[in-house]
Amino acid sequence: MVTSGQPPQAVADSVAATARRVLTTEADALRLLADLLPPDFVPAVELILNAQGRVILSGIGKSGHIARKIAATLSSTGTPAYFVHAAEASHGDLGTLTEHDICILLSNSGETTELSDLIAHTRRFSIPLIGITGREGSTLAEAADLRLLLPPAPEACIIGMAPTTSTTMALALGDALAIALMERRGFAPEHFRTFHPGGRLGARLAKVSQIMRGADALPLVAPDTPMTDTILVMTEKGAGAAGLVEGGRLTGIITDGDLRRNMAGLMGKTARDVATMTPLTAPPGMLAAEAVALMNARKVNMLFVVDDDRRPLGTLHIHDCLRAGVA
């Protein structure tokens, strides 16, 4: 348990100043990178876009960590990618690369010894090589088919040696590649959810059709259905409502609120007498999060899901959304 108090104000100010200096240094480098976008960036995007295989990334040390993250970002946004550890590549993992793949190697100096076997392998088997490096004329830059050169910028540490600014630029450039490819592919939210099915992110991208109760659970009645039978349908289906259907189309809804408002002589009425016409509905392609927002705005607990012709397909209850992690 930490028992010491806050440091003296002078120390706290110094720590805060260090943080601001680091963030400013790296932010300045990213602005420089944006202004000096490597000329091979667009060709690299097109090369990856047209690849028949995967994108294989590698690096060593801090560059290896960045390469692994770029591979994960590419994979999750529609570009199949895989990280190969540079040291393991020399002991059998070179077999991961095929002639259909594209290789991206990261090395700020461009002279990382552990990458030599990967470079040689791509040259031997004519595997396209993209190099992300900070040194023009380096071994990696000279060997690469396309060069994504990072502009000269100081590292953020006080000795100017710890990879900080350089890895930030490499990471940001990898993000730029992934998003450019994502947009070129027309990657949509439903595609994103395919690769992120778990957690709140996947839930937020779920569509109504993936959460709704299907046709078997539909509580539907005809307009002339006696209220005694209508209430039975509402109870059996457990939706707390019934849909009024005419000619196969949803024309009204009966909720618990409608029952309370029509208590006088309720059992002598028909469904048409009690229903609220033009009910609130949701299309199956709507994001479930949007449907929840609609229910909250209109202060209702469920929606009928209908197609373009207002034919009922299912129901979406707020409790279903809660269980799915949407609400």
Image (tube, rainbow, N blue to C red):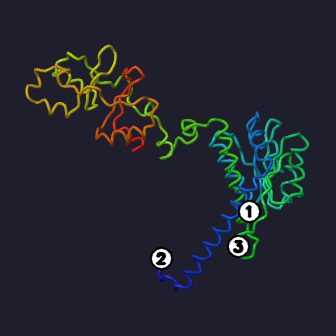
**Which residue corresponds to the image point at 20% horizontal and 17% vertical from the top-left?**
225
Residue at disc 3, secondary structure: loop
The quarter of the image holding the C terminus is: top left
Q: Earlier in the sequence, mark 3 or mark 1?
A: 3
In the depicted structure, whether residue 231 falls above or below residue 92 = above
Q: Amino acid at mark 3?
A: Cys
| Neighbourhood count class around disc 3 (C-alpha, 10 Å): few under 14, some 14–19, many 20 upward | some
Q: Quadrant of residue 134?
A: bottom right
**Which residue corresponds to the image point at 34% horizontal and 35% vertical from the top-left?**
317
Kindly indicate whether the residue at mark 1 contacts the one at mark 3 (C-beta within 8 angstroms): no
Give the label on residue 1, or none: 2
Q: Earlier in the sequence, mark 3 or mark 2?
A: 2
Give the label on residue 313, or none: none
Q: Nearer the viewer, mark 3 or mark 2?
A: 3
Q: Quadrant of residue 234?
A: top left
Relative depth, front residue between 110 and 186: 186
Kindly indicate whether the residue at mark 2 contacts the one at mark 3 (C-beta within 8 angstroms): no
| Neighbourhood count class around disc 1 (C-alpha, 10 Å): few under 14, some 14–19, many 20 upward | many
Q: CA distance from mark 3 to mark 2?
A: 30 Å
Residue at disc 2, secondary structure: loop
Give the label on residue 166, or none: 1
Q: Amino acid at mark 2?
A: Met
Q: Which residue is mark 3?
A: 157
**Which residue corresponds to the image point at 46% horizontal and 35% vertical from the top-left?**
207
The spot of residue 301 in percent (x, y) is 30, 38
Q: CA distance from mark 1 to mark 2?
A: 36 Å
